[in-house]
Amino acid sequence: MGDARKPSRRRVSASIRGLLKVGMLFALSTAIAQNTSSSQFTVKPLPLPGVHGLVTLDYFSYDKTTQSLWVPASNTGSVDVIDTKTDRIKRAKGFPVAQVQILGKMRTVGPSSIAIGEGVAYVGSRADSRICVVDARTLKQRGCIAFAPRSAGLAAAPDGLIYIAVTKELWATSGAPPIGVPAADRSIQILAASPPAHLAAAGKIPLPGSAEGYAVDNLHGRFYTNLEETGQTVAIDVRKRAVLSTWKSCDDPSGVAVDSKRGFVFVACVDHVIVLDAGHDGRLTGSIPTGAGVDNIDYSEDNQLMYVGAAEAAQLTIARVDDSGVPSAMAVVKTTKGARSVVAGANGTAFLIDPLAGGMLKVEPK
């Protein structure tokens, strides 16, 4: 009985390791919080290989397991994979490109969306409306599936992709709402991804508008997306495949991020981000100005920081969100005109796409 009350050496060690980890995360958050000016950050351009001038960039994704950044460079017909520890870049090649009309001009499109699965990455292409599976280690393609007929055009081509770990499914949206191309099929299409290298159609969830932006809460089995036409945000049960709630958010909503532990949903608006409380029927808890040109945003649950890139304002806002759901700016970092969409990496690092310069920006505290 006495031994049952006494913690083992292994338990004590685990507790110490846990406290050390918490302490490190707190120190990191504090360091970032104190860095309130651009001078406390480095902004490093990461040019993509073989690119001269403009490159079409949209979605990109961070693989926490390998600390690598997957960047579909649409008009090059490739996906660039950046080792964020060394900034070395490898390239997955062989994706088709095509000329399509966008906003009255002919543009070259190709691989444009990405999701990280289990040992693989899923790449959606606007050139041929297919989704391909790429081995995360070898960068070789392991097969593709037709998402829509190629002749159906951009309105039917894959837009956003996201892997739902709790159900082992790939969810996909279509169209290109921000450039005036509403989805031909206003639904979320579901592909079974078990085994990971084999995709198969598994149903869809009808929506009353074109889906724009996404985030998944694997802890509670919730998926969040915006409805472009109506300025609403919807919450979906990933197991039941049913819409649970629809909340008014803002005009022209774009990116979404989520704090799974505290139940906050962050919605990107044109020049600010709002915070909704998912546990209280989407109640608005706070808002923060970020500058114009906001697209996809990200949130780090490790340090409770939100990252928002603004293309027109040429800045990155890093904000802390308190337990009441009220955001406050911890730092505003100068970037470059046109740099938008952001993904959080390890140790307070963030990455933005920089299409005009043909590459990425890496922002990290000094």
Image (tube, grey):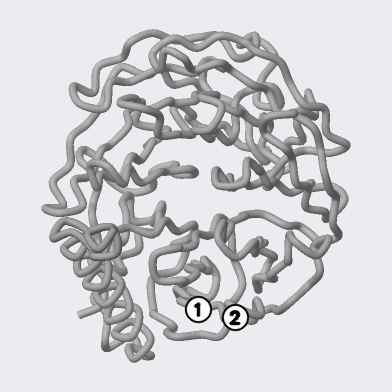
First reached walking from the N terminus: tag 1 or tag 2 = 1
Q: Which residue is mark 2?
A: 327
Q: Which residue is mark 1?
A: 319
At mark 1, the secondary structure is strand
Q: Picture coordinates of residue 241 (x, y %)? A: 74, 29
Q: Picture coordinates of residue 337 (x, y %)? A: 45, 68
Amino acid bearing label 2: Pro
The image quadrant that residue 1 belongs to is bottom left
Q: Residue at x 45, y 59 (%)?
A: 342
In this rendering, position of residue 205 left or right of residue 98: right
Neighbourhood count class around disc 1 (C-alpha, 10 Å): few under 14, some 14–19, many 20 upward: many
Q: Picture coordinates of residue 7 (x, y %)? A: 23, 63
Q: Contact, CB < 8 Å: mark 1 with mark 2? A: yes
Quadrant that contains the C terminus = bottom left
Along the line of sight, the residue nearer the viewer: 89 or 2? 2
Along the line of sight, the residue nearer the viewer: 324 or 66? 324
At mark 2, the secondary structure is strand
Measured along the vertical axis of the image, is residue 42 above or below residue 46?
Answer: below
Measured along the vertical axis of the image, is residue 207 above or below residue 202?
Answer: below
In this rendering, position of residue 53 left or right of residue 208: left
The image quadrant that residue 30 belongs to is bottom left
Q: Residue at x 62, y 10 (%)?
A: 201
Residue 275's disc is: none
Residue 288 visible at all? no
Q: Picture coordinates of residue 8 (x, y %)? A: 18, 59
Count of numbered tags? 2
Measured along the vertical axis of the image, is residue 365 above or below residue 66?
Answer: below
In this rendering, position of residue 202 left or right of residue 53: right
